[in-house]
Image: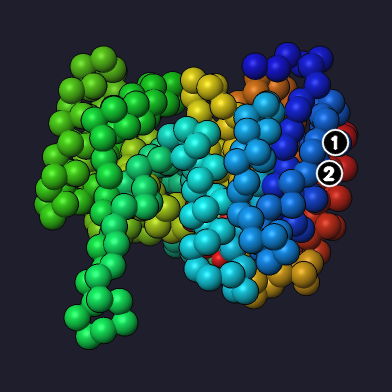
Amino acid sequence: MLDEHGTLKLAVIPGDGIGTEVVAEGLKVLDAAGVKAETTTYDLGAKRYHATGETLPDSVLEELRGYDAILLGAVGDPSVPPGVLERDLLLRLRFELDHYVNLRPVKLFPGVTTPIAGAGPEDIDMVVVREGTEGPYAGAGGVLRRGTPHEIATQESFNTAYGVARVVRYAFAKAQARPRKKLTLVHKTNVLTYAGDLWMRTVESIAPEFPDVTVDYCHVDAASMFFVTQPSRFDVIVTDNLFGDILTDIGAAIAGGIGLAASGNVNPERTAPSMFEPVHGSAPDIAGQGKADPTATVLSVAMMLDHLGLTEAAARVERAVAADLAERAGAGTRSTSQIGDDIAKRVAG
Ligand SMILES: NC(=O)C1=CN([C@@H]2O[C@H](COP(=O)(O)OP(=O)(O)OC[C@H]3O[C@@H](n4cnc5c(N)ncnc54)[C@H](O)[C@@H]3O)[C@@H](O)[C@H]2O)C=CC1
Ligand SMILES: CC(C)CC(=O)C(=O)O
Ligand SMILES: [Mg+2]
């Protein structure tokens, strides 16, 4: 963990599309926060793939292990076959660096509009603890008779006792540290009986370690409904990789939009650097137009600072974002860099 006087060794992977635009603003705000950082930018993404065929060379992966943290924009481009960058770059980073906690706060800031009628910041304040290294994203499966009418495609979900226990234990601790102390397991135990049973038994077996945490369960379909009808029922959610991915886009929508949703791919034992990134993707539909909201990336920078122990700087960035958001309604339309400038100014004080 860095102290307030240390130099942060930061690897930056802007990636594709709006990734490059929003990361520039994240770094602007980091600089304004007065954090001493030595940044190295890696050109991983579509351009490098087209130029060299590489997604994540082993040598780069090994280099990345030497940083305090990684800041990533987004990867994925329509010019690259689906999954190549998402799987071989982004997911490989998460898996290799053992980011088993994908931490995704869903928090409505004061002044931000939610599509849920009558809801306010007190109703939408939860944290989704999404498992980050297993589930259907592990890459198991295959295809038989591809392209024929008898094609069979399988995509298996991997859930290990070890992997589920460690993320569930993390989520319990997270719930215990919050005022409401409530943990909801979200799964689909009524249909995905093998995986669901493991998740349920794991939660039940760890619960006695956290006697002050209230535990409940919700099927993922019902949880999706409650996100938009009754979000206040959730405090901390623990769920698998796929359900967490989907739920957190819904979470973004109810908390002001995907441009505000931050995340951390966390390695809690710090055996490798954690990686912080907005929840959104590379948004090819608006890339290069200065339309992307960089706030999610700025909040991801705040999460990174907090993770590194730079709590004062993290709080300053979050306060600046909150102040910017509170005045957005009257601010008119601003470009990506204008939003970054405005937040950076507030951070610098
Ligand atoms: N972590 C990552 O690197 C992720 C990568 N992807 C990849 O990104 C590419 C595009 O995926 P989509 O499904 O379209 O998801 P997306 O999140 O990139 O975009 C969905 C919609 O949200 C809008 N949007 C996203 N970020 C925004 C921002 N900061 N400000 C304003 N509007 C924003 C986009 O314009 C688009 O209409 C794909 O290649 C996908 O695989 C998708 C999600 C995560
Ligand atoms: C692009 C995927 C690999 C991941 C994703 O959508 C996410 O982590 O939110
Ligand atoms: Mg996603």
| Residue type (three-letter) at the residue carrying disc 1 | Asp
In the structure shown, which secondary structural element does the residue marked by tag 1 occupy?
A: helix
For residue 201, side relative to residue 137 (left or right): left
Give x and y (percent) for residue 275: 60, 38
Residue 21 sits above or below residue 4 on the image = below
Q: State which quarter of the image contains the N terminus.
A: top right
| Cα gap from disc 2 to disc 1, whole angstroms | 5 Å
As rendered, which of 315 and 265 lies closer to the eye?
A: 265
Give x and y (percent) for residue 109: 59, 46
Please report the residue visible at 37 percent of the width from the left and 52 percent of the height from the top: 139
Residue extending farthest bottom: 149
For residue 198, side relative to residue 66 (left or right): left
Please report the residue visible at 29 percent of the width from the left and 62 percent of the height from the top: 142
Residue 177 sits above or below residue 236 on the image = above
The answer to whether residue 127 is seen in the rendering is no
Q: Are marks 2 and 1 in contact (CB under 8 Å)?
A: yes
| Residue type (three-letter) at the residue carrying disc 2 | Lys
- Ligand 1 is within 8 Å of the C-beta of the residue at disc 1: no
The residue that disc 2 covers is: 28
For residue 125, side relative to residue 4 (left or right): left
In the structure shown, which secondary structural element does the residue marked by tag 2 occupy?
A: helix
For residue 295, side relative to residue 197 (left or right): right
Please report the residue visible at 59 percent of the width from the left and 63 percent of the height from the top: 76
Q: Quadrant of residue 10?
A: top right
Q: State which quarter of the image contains the C terminus.
A: top right
The residue that disc 1 covers is: 31
Residue 19 sits above or below residue 346 on the image = below
Residue 167 sits above or below residue 332 on the image = above
